[in-house]
Amino acid sequence: KELIMNNPTFARTRENMNEFKACGMWASLLRKSLACIAHLYSGYYFSDIVSLSKKIQNCDDVTLKGFRSIESRRFPHGFSMIKFKKDMPLDRVISFFPMVTLSEDKKTVTMKIERLRPYSNIHWAYRYMSFRLSLVALELADMVYNEALHCYEPTVSGLDAKTEITVSDWMSAVMDPEDFTMETSFAAPAMQKPGTVVLVALGIELSPANCNSKDTMLPAQGTMGIIECFVD
């Protein structure tokens, strides 16, 4: 340890170690912000998040190596690449294209699906009779190096506690095609400070049971994924 931390030969190693620490911190921020739908992801998804963080970090061609920032706005399309459930990722389960918007006041996220028809649009490995959707909105902070404190820190702290989620009623898998809309809202406008983005995640739960729209305790499986990233 003494050799690695002080010998000039290991300067590049120290740079990589410092930046990798930032990647782990940023990945943990994202995971904590998605805790409300943790039951819909599993397996080795965390390595995908860390991999994305490194891709974003590599986009920083201004800061000195060893202290580069992780700024999500540099690679907003990368979030859809995270496979939160390797065997049944969201992009393999759904064949509809949700339209997602953020209101001008940056408080309300709206998702619209045209002519939703479960048996044609939602593909699961097992027969299901009911399904429901979860719409999650979260604000994610960048990870930047604080020279005064000699450490990485998020541009805004405590954002993981501000995640908002709306869960639909249970719906029948044999419903007729219909236009579907969901909304979820932050208590206060998002992205009021520089160095944050708004992410939108979609979760799907599927049950082999027929159920009433308000049922909550049902045997269900599902998956989720990030479907949009809004930058200021």
Image: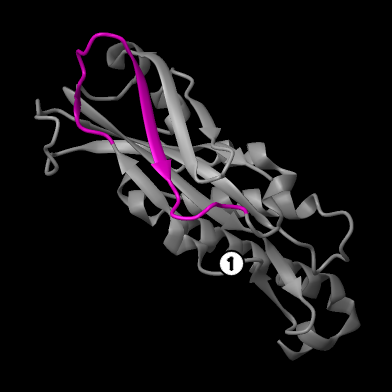
Decide if residue 33 is on the left or right side of residue 189.
left
On screen, 220 above or below 145? above
Kindly identify the residue that appears in the image at 69 percent across and 45 percent down: 232
Kindly identify the residue that appears in the image at 23 percent across and 24 percent down: 126
Decide if residue 209 is on the left or right side of residue 83.
left
Q: How many marks?
A: 1
Disc 1 marks which residue? 25
Disc 1 is placed on an element classified as: helix
On screen, 220 above or below 163? above
Q: Nearer the viewer, residue 57 or 174?
A: 174
**Which quarter of the picture shows residue 92?**
top left
On screen, 21 above or below 213? below
- Asked if the stretch drawn in magenta spans residue 173, the answer is yes
Amino acid type, mark 1: Met
Q: Nearer the viewer, residue 76 or 179?
A: 179
Residue 67 drawn at (x, y percent): 80, 69
Magenta region = 168-191
Kindly identify the residue that appears in the image at 56 percent across and 69 percent down: 157
Q: What colour scheme does the image use?
A: one colour
Residue 76 seen in render: yes
Residue 100 drawn at (x, y percent): 51, 30
State the residue lying farthest toward the front: 105
- Asked if the stretch drawn in magenta spans residue 170, the answer is yes
